[in-house]
Image (tube, grey):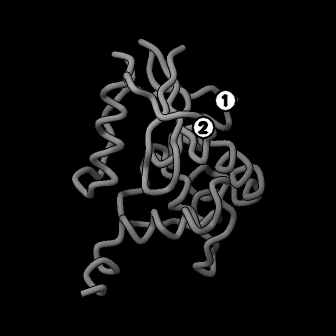
Amino acid sequence: METVFIQTPLGIAKIEGDENGISIISVNQEGDLSSEIPKNLKNSVTQLNEYFEGKREEFTFKLNPKGTEFQQKVWQELLKIPFGKTMSYLDLSKKLGDVKAIRAVASANGKNPLWIVVPCHRVIGTDGSLTGYAGGLWRKKWLLDHENPLKQQSLF
């Protein structure tokens, strides 16, 4: 497993992976920024930087997150939420076929090991509120604002 630490607008991100794909991307890590990027992580670093520069809306590098079968199912559904769009926890539960599983879905969402790439930040409360985010609600708000072109246009 290789690791790299990069600077993002939201703090230091840690990326872990190998030839089988990226297994962890997390933020707010302690550690020094990496001076060299391992070969297996270069594509992910490039694409994350492009995302933060506003030049990328989708990620194409190979993912290899570790989790239960249910968590994997939830994370696969999260990947279907388009850039700039949101979905409620209830709607996500419906898409997974069980509205009663909303708490389990929320829990799996919170255990997502691939920050930004598996867009758990795009899941909001049924009333539109920014509920729960492992990286902090201020980061969730920043990411949603970054991805919403209407909000970006309203700044001018």
Residue 74 percent coordinates (x, y): 60, 44
Q: Tag 1's secondary structure?
A: loop
Tell me which corner region of the image, top left, top right, bottom left or bottom right, holds residue 127. bottom right
Residue 72 percent coordinates (x, y): 60, 34
Instruction: Residue under label 2, please give it.
Output: 113
Report how many numbered discs are placed on residues in the image: 2
Q: Is residue 44 above or below residue 13?
A: above
Which residue is pictured at 60% across the width and 37% down the height? 113
Which mark is first along the chain, 1 or 2?
1
Q: Is residue 153 left or right of residue 1?
A: left
- Quarter placement of the C terminus: bottom left
- Quarter placement of the N terminus: top right
Label 2 amino acid?
A: Pro
Which residue is pictured at 56% across the width and 62% down the height? 123
99 or 56: nearer the eye?
A: 56
Which residue is pictured at 64% across the width and 72% down the height? 125
Q: Is residue 80 above or below residue 145?
A: above
Q: Residues within 10 Å of mark 2 (few under 14, many from 20)?
A: many
112 or 73: nearer the eye?
A: 112
Q: Is residue 2 above or below residue 126?
A: above
Q: Which mark is residue 111?
A: none
Q: Is residue 28 left or right of residue 143?
A: right
Q: Residues within 10 Å of mark 1 (few under 14, many from 20)?
A: some
Label 1 amino acid?
A: Gly
Q: Is residue 9 left or right of residue 67?
A: left
Instruction: Residue under label 1, please give it.
Output: 67
Marks 2 and 1 in Cβ contact (< 8 Å) = yes
Residue 99 percent coordinates (x, y): 70, 60
Tell me which corner region of the image, top left, top right, bottom left or bottom right, holds residue 41. top left
Residue 107 percent coordinates (x, y): 74, 49
